[in-house]
Amino acid sequence: SDSSKRGYDVDGALHTAVRMVQKGYAPCDEIQLELVRCLINAGASPCSRATSTGETALFIAAEACEDQLIRVIIKSYATFLSTTRTKRRRDPFLQKQPESFFKKIEDQEEGEKLIALRE
């Protein structure tokens, strides 16, 4: 899916990057971790499910028992969400919306994150 709305499948790219570590095709080194950070920063969601397997990138990382990768995914996604929420709330057009508008979106984002973490 194109969650970035830029014509790229960043969610699919994130799944591939994490799967490469899980399968042993790529080491869990700083280069791979930076790739994961960049993809999440570009809008890839570690909570999105792969079309073929239904697994999230976070689940794949946990399945691979890669603690460092799991930490990078969680921290990068938290940073991304925080930045996105700040931008959303500062957007001149969206500032006209009631607080309930933002709360609903943020609650949905938190719900998706919690579901991914529980898997």
Image: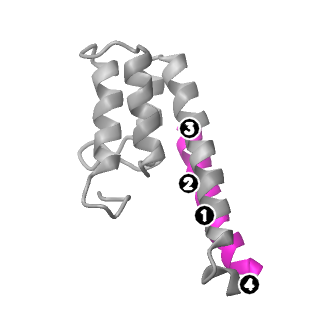
Could you tell me the amino acid type at mark 1?
Gln
Q: Which residue type carries mark 3? A: Ser
Front residue of 92/54: it is 92
For badge 2, the amino acid type reads Glu
Q: Is residue 35 left or right of residue 115?
A: left
Kind of element beneath mark 1: helix
Q: Which residues are magenta?
A: 99-119
Q: Quadrant of residue 29?
A: top left
CA gap, disc 1 to disc 4?
Answer: 16 Å
**Residue tagged by mark 4?**
98
Q: Residue at label 1?
A: 108
- Residue identified by numbered label 3: 76
State the separation of the CA atoms marked 4 and 2.
Answer: 22 Å
Name the amino acid, label 4: Pro
Q: Residue furthest front?
A: 92
Q: Earlier in the sequence, mark 2 or mark 3?
A: 3
